[in-house]
Amino acid sequence: MLIRMTSQRSNQFKEKLRNTPNKPGVYLMHDAFGQTLYVGKAKNLKKRISSYFQSSRKRHLAQPKIKAMIEIVHDIDYLCVDSESEALILESQLIKKYKPKYNTSLKDDKRFLLVQINPKEALPRFRLTRNKTYRYYRYYGPFPHSGSLRKTLNLMKKKFGILLHDASPKKIDEQNWRLFDDIRAEINELPNIVTEDAYRERVQKACAFLEGKTEEIIKDLHTQMMLHSEKQNFEKAGDCRDRIIAIQQTSRRTRKFERNLIGLISENESLECLKEALDLKAIPKIIECFDISHISGSFCVASMVRFTNGKRDKKNYRRYKIQSFTGNDDFKAMEEVVSRRYKRLVKEAKSLPDLIVIDGGIGQVHASIKALLKEGIEPPFLIGLAKKKETIVFSNGKDPLNLPYRNPALRLLRHLRDEAHYFANNFNADLRSKKIKESILDQFKGLGIVRKNKLINHFGSIDKIKKAKTEELTEIDGIGEKTASALLQFLNNENLT
């Protein structure tokens, strides 16, 4: 919901505040230009927001910083959540996103804890981290209560027999591992010696627990608590109670807050606004957006993202390497990728989107229309979004359109464009990273371009070459045992992570 405030802070504003719910949530204060001034969390949104504008609450206005901010507040957004924990997480994420002028805390890039698992480890361990560093790792969280999370992990270690970050398991034969140096109380009655398959079954159960399937353990702890209490063993009963509380606080991390630029307006409302703004005949249920990314003409790639009913449809995202030329030509690149995308859809007898959005101005729009007409495809409704002033450019000759910054239709278009931009840039970065890694082979003496290409083509990446065995490398024509051994030693001495 959007609360619009008058400069007189009139009774009309108080009337609107009466509709604000008495629920936990996060509120954002904006100036007249749509810039976010402040992000705050509240146990009770109605009481908290109202407190800023009640003359009796002089303690707020006594602070010069808050008084100055209130003077320029133009509107307020708020978002209800289910708990204070969710409000805490969302507040942190929005402060990092918008970097509001009047927020003094949480700008230091401190993040909540995540649980990280590397599925490629022989015996995956459960580690704590604050950043999602590796794409193929599994992450759970974020968790706002770090103390509760650590208690919960220790409980999981005992309950499921899993390894945490400080564990040093030892392989004792071809199939079996010893998890700990001795059979400790931490793993209860679970075997200390396990196979990789048996251990992974434990990991799956622990992961299910982190995903919220906690009922069985809580019920068991509650039974233990009652038994200890009946025996007047209150210390152990209290320990069970603390564990239950820790689990409940940990599991209340609930949903991921992937809030986007649409803000607090529903997807249906945003799509309806977009229909009206573009003068479309119907709501655009399927929207596809294109972006081009390159570094001075090198590693030129493109992305296509799809939104269905106003939401990201990631399974239908696509990325492309530009094939028709080398260099810096955004128009030509856009023409190629639009042609490839819709030529394929037509060939597969699939429906075209209701709306196509191009990241760029009239040049990119014309290139896209040219691509469709060349393929004999009747163009769907197609627009461009020029970054400088967020100008909407039409392909049908209609005058360019500039919507208000906080207009839901523009927010949706910007979210589309930013998603495509992010997806394209990530692909570009992946290619550059891969190229840098591949170039490490140039530093290995005695390996020419032919054998280098054979290795890359056979294994697919430097990481896979690095993990290969000597006999696997010798299967490549021209790679002997001596060269293979020296190459593995060279690669494993390099920092290629």
Image (spheres, grey):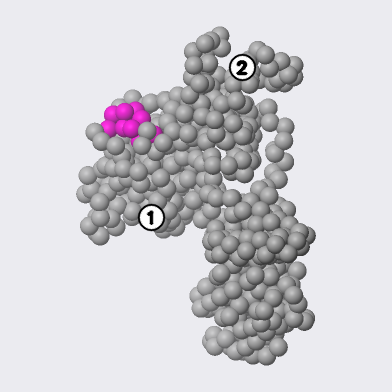
Q: Is residue 411 above or below residue 145?
A: above
Residue type marked 2? Phe
* Residue drawn at 66 percent across, 74 percent down: 161
Compare residues 307 and 375 and report the one nearer the observer: 307
Q: Secondary structure at mark 1?
A: helix
x and y, in percent, of residue 346 in the image: 24, 55
Q: Residue at x 53, y 16 (%)?
A: 14
- Between marks 1 and 2, how big is the CA–CA gap? 47 Å
Residue on which the image places disc 2: 53
One can see residue 462 in this view = no
Q: Secondary structure under badge 2?
A: loop
Q: Is residue 229 left or right of residue 81?
A: right
* Nearer-N-terminus badge (1/2): 2
Label 1–label 2 contact, CB within 8 A: no
Q: Give the position of the C terminus as an image quadrant.
A: bottom right
| Residue of label 1 | 316
First to last magenta residue range: 270-280
Q: Toward which corner of the image does residue 408 lie, by quadrant?
A: top left
Residue plotted at (67% across, 28% down):
101
Q: Is residue 180 visible?
A: yes
Q: Nearer the viewer, mark 1 or mark 2?
A: 2
- 260 or 457, which lies in front? 260
373 in magenta:
no
Measured from the top left, where is residue 78 in percent x and y?
Answer: 53, 31
Left or right: residue 151 versus residue 391 is right
Front one among 66 and 240: 240
